[in-house]
Amino acid sequence: MNKLTGRTVAVRAVRQGFWLAGALAGGSLVWILRSLVSPGTLILGVGAVMLFAALVGELIVAFTAIRSTRRVIPPPNAQPADGRIERLVITGATGEPNRRDPRFSAFRALRPVENLPPPARLPSGSMPPLLGRITLVSLFVGRDQHPWSDDEIARAHAALFRAGEWIEREAIRWKAPVNLTLADTYFVVDDDEATNDVEMTFEPEGESVGPLEAHAVTKALIDTSRAASKLGFRDAVDWMEQIRARVDADALVWLLHPRRAGRSLAIPLDLTELAGVSLAVCYARESSFPEPLIRSPFTDPVTVVHELLHLFGASDKYGVPLRSYPPRSVSPRDIMRLNELSLSRLRIDRQTAWEIGWEIDDALPRDR
Ligand SMILES: [Zn+2]
């Protein structure tokens, strides 16, 4: 039998409370009105009061259940965050060390490894909570006849370290057991077959609308599959399944870094059009319209964190007034609101923490 969770206990208390309140209100009514109305009317009235109170209770329970459908059970052996980001070996991956940062290597091939678990199906359905051991895997895609240089890739990794450390610091504040690692092997391809035709649409952004490239999700998935076949895999699903079997982690975060300017986006599991292929596209510069890079690439750790959190269920908080959220649940400094340019000015507020599964056992930070 399942253990009672804190929430189940709370639901029972709410239900019992409202039934009890209904009975008390009904009883009091009988006492007050006993000499004024006929017994038949009295019984009907008392029944109506009790039912109404119970109905209010059930509605509250049902409403909070909608809000609590996320699973927030940490994976087994999840350790407290320590603020340090380590590298994680992709078992049996061979590569060429990066000339600027030889701790990381560009993927060449997968060699057979004994006792490897068979490639498992990619997860599907709802987004996992941001808990347990999470590994970031990067794919650098050269565009417009400009490959990523070792130097640029090393700088991108420095940004990933900063992004990971920031997430773990916030996890410490929220007492969430999360440990991020960076895969020691990254993937690089050049893609000049990608179509550069751009069709724009306007998407709702809170209470206004903003420009967005049409079919951005489909295009990113097609680009990923083309990259996977250039790397020697059948397609994106085959690639991710094979790497998944060689990484000892609870969840993988796939980061696509096109060497272009554009609007970064996340493709969470519930939005993907390709079975289980979920990833974050982090452009080398942010711009509203996709376009070739004019300056050198700049992987912004704020973008990496923001898009990564989308993959674990966080929603955008910009474009809507703060008063539309419950009191003290979203501040101007929330990472999903993007009011600030520097990670040091940003944080994870209560609403976002709840969305990514961090509000466990009322472990709330004190400095809110
Ligand atoms: Zn966003």
Image (cartoon, rainbow, N blue to C red):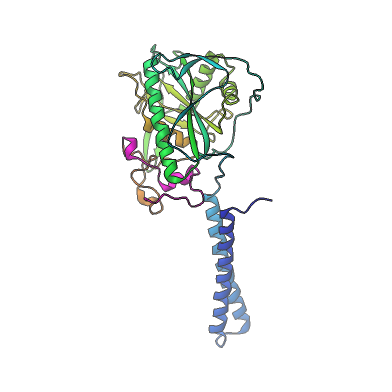
Image vertical order of residue 243 relative to residue 165, above or below: above
Image vertical order of residue 230 relative to residue 265, above or below: above
What are the residue bounds of the magenta stretch?
341-368
Q: Out of 273 and 348, give the one closest to the viewer.
A: 348
Question: Residue 355: percent from the left, percent from the top?
Answer: 48, 44
In the rendered picture of this protein, how many numbered marks are placed on residues? Answer: 0
- Residue 345 colored in magenta in the image: yes
Question: Residue 222: percent from the left, percent from the top?
Answer: 51, 21
Q: Out of 33 and 295, give the one closest to the viewer.
A: 295
Question: Residue 13: percent from the left, percent from the top?
Answer: 57, 62
**At x 51% / y 51%, what residue is drawn?**
361
Question: Residue 95: percent from the left, percent from the top?
Answer: 50, 14
Residue 114 visible (yes or no): yes
Residue 212 visible (yes or no): no
**At x 54% / y 63%, what residue is drawn?**
56
Image vertical order of residue 361 relative to residue 74, above or below: below
Q: Residue furthest right?
A: 1
Q: Residue furthest bottom?
A: 35
Q: Residue furthest top?
A: 145
**Picture quarter containing residue 53?**
bottom right
Image vertical order of residue 236 relative to residue 71, above or below: above
Q: Is residue 108 left or right of residue 154?
A: right
**At x 40% / y 46%, what residue is drawn?**
349
**Picture quarter containing residue 153?**
top left
- Residue 332 colored in magenta in the image: no
What secondary structure is the stretch in magenta mostly built from? loop
